[in-house]
């Protein structure tokens, strides 16, 4: 269970307000902005409001939570933030909303005017259900229900994947070698992009000056390029820091590559790695990895629930994975990262009271835990051998 009072901004709320929170996100250059969603599906914001990133319609900062009426009653499933800051939010229906800094069209509305309130992003996404979003510093990625990746915003290094370095004012489908692939996961570094296909292949594009694309060189890529070094592994999860990347395979192995000035690769030194290198080899199976584009910190959780962290830790460089006393990777970012942001949308609902039937239902068709897939009418259903055997 995540204790959100570990993030200092939430000490501004009273006990009743804290108890009402279902999901939350802390962001901003000094971790001075917060969004939270209540059990009643109301969205509230508080903080400094840099670049109108609170979406309140004005530029006023607030220490009292303000409600975003335009999102009232919409069930939020995910949100992501850029360093501008700009905010992307998706609902259960797959609608995408954006607001905040827009100097490079990272809101995807075709303009460069600040987005003072949440606006529906619809260009090129009509009839598409957005299932995942990720923000780099000033660019945005969206993944749709049919496995397509869309990108827009700042493109000085090719992070939009369009083949040029012209900024992209509205969502554009990332094609080239992703053309006939079904993508299942996306992540952004500061000025780079990375995506995983349903067969475990990893593709990267954008800035590569620190080797964060894992291609064995440090040349920028204007279109997606496959990480050949991981071709014998099936990657389930990816995470990107400011200029480094992490990948978790279906066998629970962890690979890291890219910038390493703070030890964020966990290799024991501070040398950048242009290709993926396996880390934490002596440890048990890893089940979760964590990083975010506004920090140089990395974290991982093992099968038995141990949480490790490495990289920038309160100004120090931790060059090897360090066992913490935490039970969640979220706590690593609350207590150690600079700024102390959240690396994902926090959820207060814990899973430990689910019945066996509920647990099985939750894992039904989950590509992250399945070990077998059936193709029916060209669509995959992800299943579990053990469950089939029991049945």
Image (tube, grey):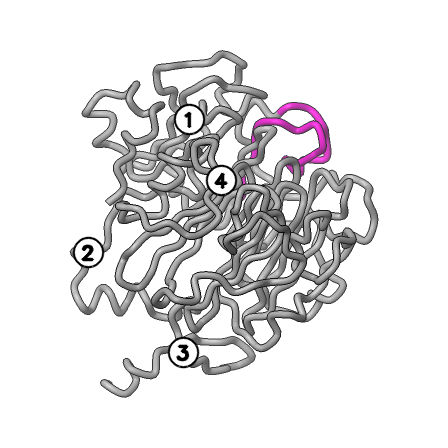
User: Crowding near pointer 1: few (<14 within 10 Å), some, many (20+)?
Assistant: few
Rounded to the nearest whole Å, what is the CA distance between mark 1 and mark 4? 43 Å
- The answer to which of marks 1 and 3 sits earlier in the sequence is 1
Residue indicated by mark 4: 317
Magenta stretch in the rendered image: 96-114
Residue indicated by mark 2: 352
Rendered image quadrant of residue 12: top left
- The answer to which of marks 4 and 3 sits earlier in the sequence is 4
- SS assignment at label 3: loop
**Can you say whether 92 is above or below 383 in the image?**
above
Q: Position of residue 162 (x, y in %)?
A: 78, 52
Residue indicated by mark 3: 371
Q: Which mark is residue 69?
A: 1
Contact between labelled residues 4 and 2, with CB atoms less than 8 Å apart: no
Q: In front: mark 2 or mark 4?
A: 4
Rounded to the nearest whole Å, what is the CA distance between mark 1 and mark 2? 33 Å
Q: Position of residue 44 (x, y in %)?
A: 38, 27
- The answer to which of marks 2 and 4 sits earlier in the sequence is 4
């Amino acid at each position: 269970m995540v204790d959100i009072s570990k993030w200092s901004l939430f000490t501004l709320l009273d006990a009743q307000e804290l108890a009402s929170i279902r999901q939350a996100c802390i962001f901003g250059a000094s971790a001075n902005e917060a969004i939270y969603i209540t059990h009643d599906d109301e969205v509230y914001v508080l903080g400094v409001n840099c670049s109108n990133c609170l979406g309140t319609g004005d530029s006023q900062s607030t220490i009292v939570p303000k409600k975003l009426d335009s999102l009232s009653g919409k069930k939020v499933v995910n949100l992501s933030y850029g360093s501008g800051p700009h905010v992307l939010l998706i609902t259960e229906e797959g609608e995408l909303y954006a607001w905040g800094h827009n100097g490079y069209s990272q809101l995807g509305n075709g303009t460069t005017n600040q987005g003072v309130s949440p606006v529906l992003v619809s260009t090129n996404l009509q009839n598409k259900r957005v299932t995942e979003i990720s923000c780099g510093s000033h660019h945005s990625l969206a993944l749709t229900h049919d496995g397509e990746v869309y990108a827009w915003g700042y493109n000085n290094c090719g992070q939009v994947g369009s083949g040029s370095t012209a900024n992209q004012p509205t969502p554009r489908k990332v094609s080239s070698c992703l053309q006939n692939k079904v993508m299942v996961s996306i992540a952004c570094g500061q000025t780079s992009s990375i995506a995983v296909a349903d067969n475990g292949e990893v593709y990267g594009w954008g800035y590569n000056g620190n080797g964060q694309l894992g291609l064995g060189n440090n040349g920028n890529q204007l279109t997606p390029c496959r990480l050949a070094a991981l071709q014998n592994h099936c990657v389930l999860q990816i995470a990107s820091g400011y200029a480094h990347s992490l990948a978790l395979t279906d066998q629970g192995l962890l690979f890291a590559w890219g910038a390493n000035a703070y030890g964020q690769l966990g290799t024991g030194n501070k040398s950048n790695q242009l290709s993926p290198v396996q880390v934490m080899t002596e440890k048990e199976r890893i089940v979760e990895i964590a990083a975010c584009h506004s920090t140089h910190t990395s974290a991982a959780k093992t099968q038995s629930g141990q949480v490790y962290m490495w990289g920038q830790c309160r100004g120090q460089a931790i060059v090897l994975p360090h066992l913490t006393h935490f039970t969640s990777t979220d706590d690593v970012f609350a207590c150690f990262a600079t700024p102390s942001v959240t690396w994902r949308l926090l959820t207060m609902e814990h899973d430990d009271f689910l019945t066996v039937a509920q647990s099985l239902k939750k894992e039904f068709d989950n590509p992250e835990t399945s070990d077998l897939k059936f193709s029916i009418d060209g669509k995959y259903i992800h299943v579990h051998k053990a469950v089939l055997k029991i049945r």
